[in-house]
Amino acid sequence: MLARTVDKLRATLPGGNIGAYQITGFSSRLLLKLGISEAILRDAIARAASDAEIAAWIRAHSDPGVYPEINAGFEQMTVGERLGDPEFVERYPIARRVPPETSRLDMLAADDEETFGKR
């Protein structure tokens, strides 16, 4: 999730194109749990020379002790928990086509693959 968030923030920089992506939702929740503001991380991304430098910056500005808890929380969220939310289903039409027990992280990966093709 963090790599995806970094890519989305990078796309908001001059010359980037975030397209249909948004920072709200998973990315904003992740940043909140890490205790890192979107604006400050965006500035760090703009200054960084590499992804490794960004990762080091994030480790230096957050508590690695919370990473397992954050990961577990994201992994436990399922598509079925949001099927009653019309905005969610409109934003992610693939949610109607995957089993309700599918993790939302797996749904995001399937949505990206459907939208952009397999990498």
Image (spheres, grey):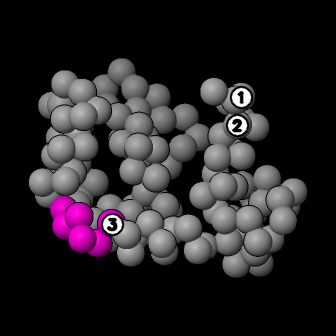
Residue 66 screen position, x and y as percent: 29, 72
Q: Amino acid at mark 3?
A: Tyr
Viewer-nearest of discs 1 and 3: 3
Q: Give the residue displayed 24% in from the left and 71% down from the top.
A: 65
Q: Which residue is mark 3?
A: 67
Label 2 packing within 10 angstroms: few (<14), some (14-19), many (20+) = few
Magenta stretch in the rendered image: 62-67
Q: Give the residue displayed 25% in from the left and 43% down from the top.
A: 55
For residue 59, side relative to residue 2 (left or right): left
Regarding mark 1 in the picture, which secondary structure is present there? Answer: loop
Q: Which residue is mark 2?
A: 113
Q: Amino acid at mark 1?
A: Gly
Label 2, label 1: how far apart the Cα atoms are: 5 Å
Q: Quadrant of residue 54?
A: top left
Regarding mark 2 in the picture, which secondary structure is present there? Answer: helix
Q: Which residue is mark 1?
A: 117
Label 1, label 3: how far apart the Cα atoms are: 29 Å
Q: Amino acid at mark 2?
A: Glu
Q: Quadrant of residue 88?
A: bottom right
